[in-house]
Image: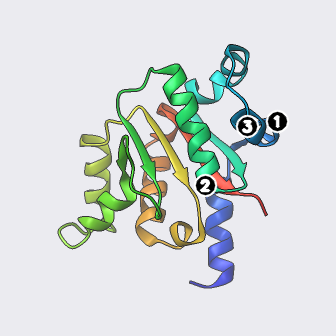
């Protein structure tokens, strides 16, 4: 994929995404101490509000730890999903693994099939995305995000997008 197209995709995916710079600065600080009730109250809206939130982290491991900390503290989600090209989850479903594993059975690039999957089987109440270059360049991920946006599913659940600090 060309650099211009890759940049366009990144700009499209970032459009309308709330960037929480305060949280970016606090993420590491929160993880190096015991999380307090005050921390949970201060940042709960990010995890409880529908729509996209973008958090920049030093590493996906740190971001994942931050997310797990809050998910465990809030204890309110039943169906958690992640979209990551690099991990196996202990909790929830990795949509990347699922879509890649079943890509020989299903043509996820087919609009109708992706729409059917999202409308009939996408029953998650929380999702986070570990947005690395491999994921951004993956056409199935691009189709997934475009269809989520088109169907307004992104606005119907909390979506945390982790990206690496540059």
Residue for badge 2: 60
Residue 38 at x, y = what percent? 73, 15
SS assignment at label 2: helix
Residue 51 in which image quadrant: top right
Residue for badge 3: 32
Q: Which residue: 69% across, 62% down?
A: 11
Earlier-in-chain disc, 2 versus 1: 1
Depth order, front residue of 18/130: 130
Cα distance, mark 2 to mark 1? 18 Å
Q: Is residue 56 above or below residue 124?
A: below
Position of the N terminus, as image quadrant, is bottom right
Compared across the picture, whether 85 is left or right of 112 comes to right
Depth order, front residue of 30/71: 30
Position of the C terminus, as image quadrant, is bottom right
Q: Residues within 10 Å of mark 3 (few under 14, many from 20)?
A: few
Compared across the picture, whether 70 is left or right of 165 comes to left
Q: Which residue: 71% across, 21% down?
A: 39
Earlier-in-chain disc, 1 versus 3: 1
Q: Residues within 10 Å of mark 2 (few under 14, many from 20)?
A: many
Residue 20 at x, y = what percent? 76, 39
Cα distance, mark 2 to mark 3? 16 Å
Q: Nearer the viewer, mark 2 or mark 1?
A: 2
SS assignment at label 1: helix
Residue for badge 1: 22
Contact? badges 2 and 3 (CB < 8 Å): no
Q: Which residue: 58% across, 42% down?
A: 65
Compared across the picture, whether 29 is left or right of 127 comes to right
């Amino acid at each position: 994929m060309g650099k211009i197209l890759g940049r366009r995709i990144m700009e499209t995916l970032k459009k309308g995404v709330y960037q929480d710079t305060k949280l970016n600065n606090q993420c590491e600080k929160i993880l190096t101490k015991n999380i307090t009730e005050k921390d949970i109250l201060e940042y709960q809206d990010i995890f409880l509000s529908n729509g996209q939130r973008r958090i920049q982290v030093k590493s996906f491991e740190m971001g994942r730890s931050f997310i797990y900390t809050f998910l465990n503290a809030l204890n309110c989600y039943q169906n958690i999903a992640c979209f990551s090209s690099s991990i196996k989850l202990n909790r929830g479903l990795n949509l990347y693994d699922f879509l890649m594993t079943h890509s020989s059975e299903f043509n996820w690039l087919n609009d109708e099939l992706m729409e059917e999957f999202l409308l009939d089987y996408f029953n998650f109440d929380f999702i986070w995305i570990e947005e690395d270059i491999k994921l951004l360049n993956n056409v199935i991920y691009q189709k997934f995000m475009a269809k989520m946006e088109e169907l307004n599913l992104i606005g119907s659940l909390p979506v945390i997008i982790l990206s690496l600090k540059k």
